[in-house]
Amino acid sequence: MKKIQMVDLKGQFEGIKNAVNASFQEIMEETSFINGPHVHAFQKDLEEYLGVKHVIPCANGTDALQIAMMGLGLKPGDEVITADFTFAATVEVIALLQLTPVLVDVDPETYNIDPDKIRKAITPKTRAIVPVHLFGQVANMDAVIKIAKEHDLYVIEDNAQAIGANYHTREGKTVKAGTMGDVGATSFFPSKNLGCYGDGGAIFTNNDELAHTIRGIVNHGMYERYHHDVVGVNSRLDSLQAAVLKAKLPKLDIYNEARKAAAFKYTVAFTGHEQIVTPYRAGDCDTHVFHQYTLRILDEKRDALAKHLQEKGLPFGIYYPIPLHKQKAYADERYNEADFPVTNRLVQEVISLPMHTELDNEQIDYFTGTIIDFLK
């Protein structure tokens, strides 16, 4: 059996190395490292794939979120509602811009932001909602957008973990995650479903004016060289990373189907086990692309299982071990523990198993067998 890895980027590279190596050679010969032809080509390919008018590449997913908020003109003191159970980058950029983060609990099945909790958190200072499509599953965007329209709020989709996922709206349309709000942001960190070989990110929008503003922000606020029309940052996707992403994008649906197939095998193996809660999928299988395959381990056995897997040299992840409202950087006297029952339970129970495009049946059988044997 091949060694089980949390992410197998080396195996995935075998299928694209000729295209990547050829593009790298071309970039080296052209010395077109910043905003070169490969960046523009990838941008257009991604716009077509997502069915969105504008893709603005940038340096990483955290920048993508920050720039999206800058583009919307959010001001210090404006309140932004987001989920308590997610990676810190989502709330980090809110704090960096001197906005006020408002953390709310998540749905107990999908682990995505709970629309009912959004409603209760809205105040006259609320300006935006940031739903996170956690672990690869699209949040309840029909409900989020409905709330946003009722209260004249912006919707900023954190799509760092769900690129390629579909969402079926109540109107019967099928759209891609990240393209439904006013603006979407994603990360191309190497372990993502669509990942480069360094850092990278992108912002999506169908709003022409917003796209124009964001294009200036990512490049020091310039639309014309040395003319700084808006306050900007230096956040650009380099040509080498764009070349990797351009080679991978045509395979993204294949990659996501491989993840779904691995997830199905995991779930079949664990079905019926009283101490294991397998991932819930809202709607059909298109809505979840399994950036992570995350179990809940009941009866306070998660940590013991984690120790057992570590002793056997098997990889796993605990995403996330501390709620954002308990993090030192984001602690606030406004928060009441009674308002976060789901998140507080999840951080004690979740464990993520290896999930990537190269998993085979032997590896999955071994991993699931190891967990089941331990929990007997």
Image (cartoon, helix red, strand yellow):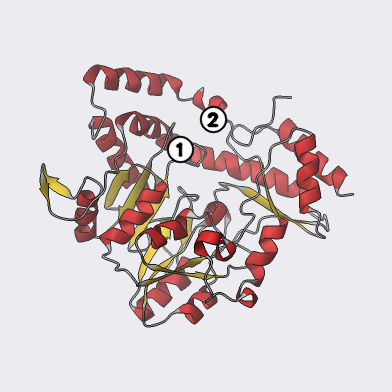
Task: Give the secondary structure at mark 2.
Answer: helix
Q: At 72% from the left edge and 57% from the top edge, which residue is drawn?
A: 349
Q: Which image quadrant is residue 57 in?
A: top left
Type of amino acid at the residue the image marks with label 1: Gly
Work out whether residue 12 can be spotted. Answer: yes
Circle 1 residues within 10 Å: few <14, some 14–19, many ≥20: many
Residue 358: image location, x then y, percent: 60, 31
Circle 2 residues within 10 Å: few <14, some 14–19, many ≥20: some
Residues at marks 2 and 1 touching, judged by CB atoms closer than 8 Å? yes
Residue at which label 1 appears: 195
- Tell which of 240 and 331 is nearer to you: 331
Mark number, residue 9: 2
Mark closest to the chain's N terminus, 2 or 1:
2
- Quadrant of the frame with the N terminus: top right
Q: Distance from label 2 to label 1 (Cα)?
A: 9 Å
Type of amino acid at the residue the image marks with label 2: Leu
Residue 134: image location, x then y, percent: 54, 56
Q: Which image quadrant is residue 10 in?
A: top right
- Tell which of 200 and 157 is nearer to you: 200
Residue 362: image location, x then y, percent: 74, 31
- Tell which of 106 and 97 is nearer to you: 97
Q: At 87% from the left edge and 43% from the top edge, which residue is drawn?
A: 373
Mark number, residue 1: none
Q: Vertical placement of 81 versus 220: above or below? A: below
Q: At 58% from the left edge and 67% from the top edge, which residue is drawn?
A: 106
Task: Give the secondary structure at mark 1.
Answer: loop
Q: Is residue 326 left or right of residue 226?
A: right
Q: Vertical placement of 277 versus 261: above or below? A: below
Q: Is residue 246 left or right of residue 144?
A: left
Residue 279: image location, x then y, percent: 66, 55
How many numbered discs?
2
